[in-house]
Amino acid sequence: MATSPEHDFLSHAALRIMESASRSGLFGYTEGQRKLFDFSCDLKKDWSKVVVGQTLWQHGGDGIDKDLRTLLNERDIAAAVYIARHESRLRTRFAEVTQSHLDTPLRDRLARLRVFWVPADFKTGDEKTEKSTYDSLREEITRDLLMHVALGGLTPQDVKRFAASRRPGLPLAILSHVKQNGYRNHRHTAKSLDVSLDALRYETERLFIIGFLESESLQGGIYDVTDSGNAMLDICSRLRDYLNGNLGQDNRNAEFEHICSLLGIAYPSIPLTTRLLGKDAEVDLQDPTALLLQHVAQADRDGSVRWPGPYFALPAASTLF
């Protein structure tokens, strides 16, 4: 089917945005097979999550039903992206179609649908307009899609609660220990980490309440690290790179900085000369970023964390043989 320049620009932009965000080192990216879709990609960590998408630009509202069925019928995907022209009749038709699926077997799959509306007067050919549209999509896709798919739904409030611990380094040590060794019980874990039983119990329960640890029992017990807990470990590992001057060229990583800004982590605001540890620590107790960096610095000094390396895209299968 013939497509318009606007359709092609928006489909390609979605892939560019996700590929660019992967340069943060928080996840890997490979472009996927399109099949019936306008675009597809695979986001990778120690898991693989497929994102597929359709772009609605030329055809009218009658095509929405077909597009959504195509997206929702795909089983093994983490998210279905729909980029559409912002018109009242299209939004109305979209609402009607999604409402009609509430009483079908596709109901449970609606939660993975992410819709991004683009101004109806968008035209390609003007560099300023294309950049403005791209930047707007980048903000929305990063905040509403990548935060949920690649970062486990991590929120600024989660970061604040994590950083607020009064025991620098210990929450990170617990997450790392559980990820590598599992969690048998409080006493065994406290001994392994060489901390008091009370401190271990308190911090573990905090991590459970925040949502960084999960257990089959509502009262806790045998814990596992959640997707958001793993994302926090990954972010702290990149923050460690920052403190050690190894984040990237000139110790900068624009994609990582952008993702952190959405989470309220303004790490460039903390100079590397800042004393984060010891009696003379220059840490503003009201600044979640400073507290978070203190956790990272303490865990790094203690050697208590196995820091995850940056994630990068895997080579395409066709290049391996």
Image (tube, rainbow, N blue to C red):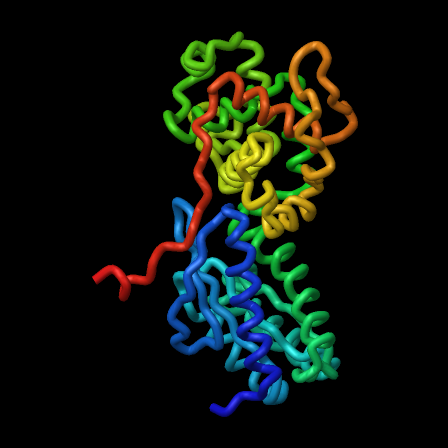
Instruction: Judge by depth and name the residue closer to the eye, 209 or 217.
Output: 209
Query: Image point 56% across, 46% down: which residue?
Result: 249
Based on the displayed image, in which of its 4 quarters is residue 189 positioned?
top left
Instruction: Judge by depth and name the residue closer to the eye, 85 or 211.
Output: 85
For residue 293, above or below residue 95: above
Q: Position of residue 235 (x, y in %)?
A: 56, 39
For residue 40, above or below residue 282: below
Residue 232 appears in the rendering: no
Q: Is residue 227 left or right of residue 318?
A: right
Q: In the orientation shown, which residue stands out farthest toward the bottom?
A: 2
Q: Where is residue 29 in the image (x, y as percent from the top left)?
A: 45, 57
Query: Image point 45% across, 36% down: which residue?
Result: 308
Q: Is residue 297 left or right of residue 262?
A: left
Based on the displayed image, in which of its 4 quarters is residue 145 positioned?
bottom right
Q: In the orientation shown, which residue stands out farthest toward the top?
A: 196
Instruction: Judge by depth and name the residue closer to the eye, 238 or 95.
Output: 238
Q: Where is residue 56 in the image (x, y as percent from the top left)?
A: 59, 80
Residue 131 appears in the rendering: yes
Q: Position of residue 74 (x, y in %)?
A: 42, 68
Instruction: Judge by depth and name the residue closer to the eye, 305 or 213.
Output: 305
Query: Image point 41% across, 13% down: which residue?
Result: 192
Q: In the orientation shown, which residue stands out farthest toward the front?
A: 250
Quadrant showing the C terminus: bottom left
For residue 64, above or below residue 205: below
Q: In the orientation shown, which residue stands out farthest toward the left?
A: 321
**Total marks drawn?**
0
